[in-house]
Image (cartoon, rainbow, N blue to C red):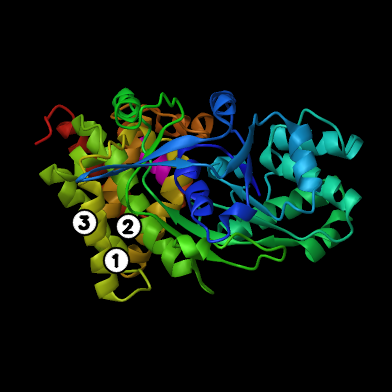
Amino acid sequence: MVHLGVGNFFRAHQAWYTEHAGDAPDWGIAAFTGRSAAIAETLAPQEGLYTLVIQGPQGNDYEVIGSLSAVHAASDLKALRSYLADPAVVVVTSTVTEAGYVRAPGGGADLADPALAADIATLRENPTADGLTTLPGKLVAGLLARRAAHERAPITFVPCDNVSGNGEMIEAVLRDTAAAVDPTLGAWIDANCGFVTTMVDRITPRPTDADLEAVRRERGVDDPAVVVTEPFTEWVLSGAFPGGRPQWETSGARFVDDIEAFETRKLWLLNGSHSLMAYAATILGIETVYDAIRDERVRGWVEEWWDVAARHLPLPPEEIRSYRAALVERYENPAIRHLLAQIAADGSQKLPIRIVPALLADRAAGVMPTGAVRAVAAWVLHLRGLGAAVHDARADEVLPLVEGPLDTAVNRVLEWLGIDDREVAAAVLAEAESLTALAATPAS
């Protein structure tokens, strides 16, 4: 297997599932870092081994994860080409955030993106060239190498980012990029490539100095690559694996024919409430999910958002109630210090899929979705410098939207989100003014 994007979540999730697969000895993961090569440098002296700390309300469980067979810097294109040309490599997973796929707003590859356009031009000139910087460019380079070596070599792409229909997303991006580089590659992709849609869930905060010290004290090892996570984990997959796959179902993964309901449940209820808290609770000076859900005001905001989402989820009411209760239990785990500032990153990628669909569905039904309106208002204030700091891949695009008077900023943001509704605009403005007034109010 190859994995792109070695973050804490991947090491708590896909690497954990592979470690616990029934046929784990038959599989290994050659992983590539994201923007920074630091984790590759940290894991190299440890031969890819690291400690996973599962933090429950009653204490910690520790285990050593050994499913990483190699970790490379993202810039090591020679190694990536070599792996993807090898027919023994039959699965490629990825966790690079939505921005990493260089997707156009309407779907498919953003061929106008300067970095992707540069990769395409480079590959047209020389299919074996180095210096590629985008995930689509690198993967197409790998597929060109695989086709050159093998007429038939099945391989499956398994994106694991919080994007609805992520399998269809990566397929469209790769096909568009391939067509721009070499139109004849499409037929080879048809014959050899599978694309799987996934829903992933496991809260994985950044480890603290106290977490590293706990590993030193309890396990007797100095491990700078420690990963901390919660006991809960979920992985739902839909699609075919023409070249085979690990027995992830033996470690709890679920393989289903239709994943949409699971995606929507998780995106709206878990991820949507995370975004709401990341923008609204930080206005109150709250730093973590645990502290946010225990604040009476924030808990009420979350429940109001869940009420909006629940009205449009294609699931039985009892299942939705049970999932909401399970989320509260997870959020109230005092061992997990999940920073809201971390969750707040890249809101331009998150709000359109986590909040806006349910907001629009409520409006179509003639309802004013207060819980969703509050999330949008909080994001407007976030972009204007209130609460968590802005770290957004599309900051150059969205920050100019919020310049000037607040009412103008609200109207611009709603237009950018595709919401053309005067009543919603008035409600968002009123909620933004109310949240601004709360900025100086201490959390309860």
Label pair 2/3, CB-CB below 8 angstroms: no
Residue 279 sits above or below residue 253 on the image:
above
Considering the numbered disc 2 on the image, is that residue within a helix, a strand or a loop? Answer: helix
* Residue drawn where x is 71% and y is 56% of the image: 90
CA–CA distance in space, label 1 to label 3: 10 Å
Observer-nearest of 441 and 11: 11
Considering the numbered disc 1 on the image, is that residue within a helix, a strand or a loop? Answer: helix
Residue 186 in magenta stretch:
no
CA–CA distance in space, label 2 to label 1: 8 Å
Q: How many marks?
A: 3
User: Mark 2 against mark 3, which lies toward the viewer?
Assistant: 2
Label pair 1/3, CB-CB below 8 angstroms: no
Look at the image and give the residue range highlighted in magenta: 408-414
Observer-nearest of 276 and 239: 239
Observer-nearest of 144 and 83: 83
Percent x, y for residue 315?
35, 74
Label pair 2/1, CB-CB below 8 angstroms: yes
**Most frequent secondary structure within the magenta stretch:** helix
Q: Amino acid at mark 1?
A: Ala
Residue 411 in magenta stretch:
yes
Considering the numbered disc 3 on the image, is that residue within a helix, a strand or a loop? Answer: helix
Q: Is residue 328 left or right of residue 270?
A: left
CA–CA distance in space, label 2 to label 3: 11 Å
Q: Amino acid at mark 3?
A: Glu
Residue under label 2: 269
Sooner in the amino-acid sequence: mark 2 or mark 3: 2
Residue 45 sits above or below residue 269 on the image:
above
Residue under label 3: 304
Residue 310, disc: 1
**Quadrant of residue 224 in the image?**
top left
Query: How many neighbours does mark 3 have within 10 angstroms: few (below 14), some (14-19), or many (20 or more)?
Result: some
